[in-house]
Image (spheres, rainbow, N blue to C red):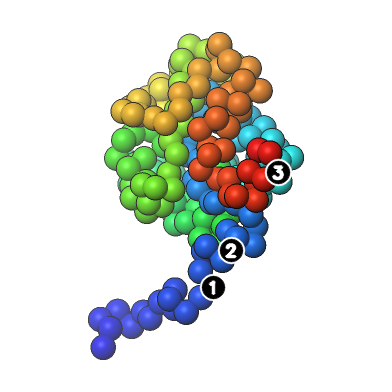
Amino acid sequence: MNDNNIYPIFSRMQIRTDKEQLLGQHSIMIWLTGLSGSGKSTIAIALERELFRLGFLCRILDGDNIRSGINNNLGFTESDRIENIRRIAEVGKLFIDSGIITISAFISPNNNIRNLARSIIGENDFVEVFVSTPLEVCEDRDVKGLYKKARLGEIKNFTGISAPFEKPENPDVEIDTTSLTVEESVNKIMEVILPLISTKKNQEWGF
Ligand code: ADP
């Protein structure tokens, strides 16, 4: 008898490795973390395009998209930020279990939150990319006008201004977009992920 009346059927479903084989790739999570305006979405989009060109199937999970859909009932308090990331990681896991390379672009401002995502996804499938563009540059870009509003006190709990951003301790890749172009940033990530996502089939094709 099961206490909560929930009976998962995972063990009877077609397994991940079958799906990875069908797609000719290994799935992983590429987790981009960094301040608003650091370049996460721009890099995610360019990375997906490059992977698609090489024949890899990806899915991007992006902050504003998720916050306008599945997480539209969450704000930016500490507990809502945790729930935001927990749901994103669970959704990411569904894609990874379907063999799909998943790129997530969320501020994810502290080690606790990133470690929560890592523990849901699984250490072996999690590649952490720190987009380390400094606050001054992000604020100067102010792509969405949010820094200006945060400075005026119109947005509360804004990361970098009125809420902290804790740097990742040991990211797999670090990218400062003040010194790297979008293309160079993508190449730097590709160097780390290609060996992880490639199968024999990709290697025979020469990439
Ligand atoms: P985030 O998703 O981290 O909030 P965005 O990708 O929305 O950031 O915004 C980053 C801004 O910085 C975009 O306007 C982008 O064109 C600009 N930018 C300039 N150089 C780069 C670079 N090398 N990599 C990524 N973005 C860059």
Whole-Å distance between the Cαs marked 1 and 3?
Answer: 27 Å
Residue 141 lies, in percent from the top left, at 59, 16
Amino acid type at circle 3 is Trp
Residue 177 lies, in percent from the top left, at 55, 17
Q: In which quadrant is the N terminus drawn?
A: bottom left
Q: Residues within 10 Å of mark 1 (few under 14, many from 20)?
A: few
Q: For residue 126, which quarter of the picture?
A: top left
Residue at x 54%, y 51% (from the top left corner): 27
Q: Which residue is mark 1?
A: 14
Question: Residue 140, which numbered label?
Answer: none
Element assignment for label 3 = loop
Element assignment for label 1 = loop
Give the foreground label among 2 and 3.
3
Whole-Å distance between the Cαs marked 2 and 1?
Answer: 8 Å
Give the foreground label among 1 and 3.
3
Earlier sequence position, callout 2 versus callout 3: 2
Up/down of 117 relative to 94, above or below = above
Amino acid type at circle 2 is Lys
Earlier sequence position, callout 2 versus callout 1: 1
Up/down of 121 relative to 36, above or below = below
Q: Residue furthest front?
A: 204
Residue 24 lies, in percent from the top left, at 64, 54
Q: Residues within 10 Å of mark 2 (few under 14, many from 20)?
A: some
Is residue 125 at least partly visible in the picture? yes
Up/down of 162 relative to 7, above or below = above
- Mark 2 and mark 1 in contact? Answer it, CB < 8 Å: yes
Question: Residue 19, which numbered label?
Answer: 2
- Mark 1 and mark 3 in contact? Answer it, CB < 8 Å: no
Q: Residue furthest bottom?
A: 1
Q: Is mark 3 within 8 Å of ligand 1?
A: no
Q: Which residue is mark 3?
A: 205
Q: For residue 90, which quarter of the picture?
A: bottom left
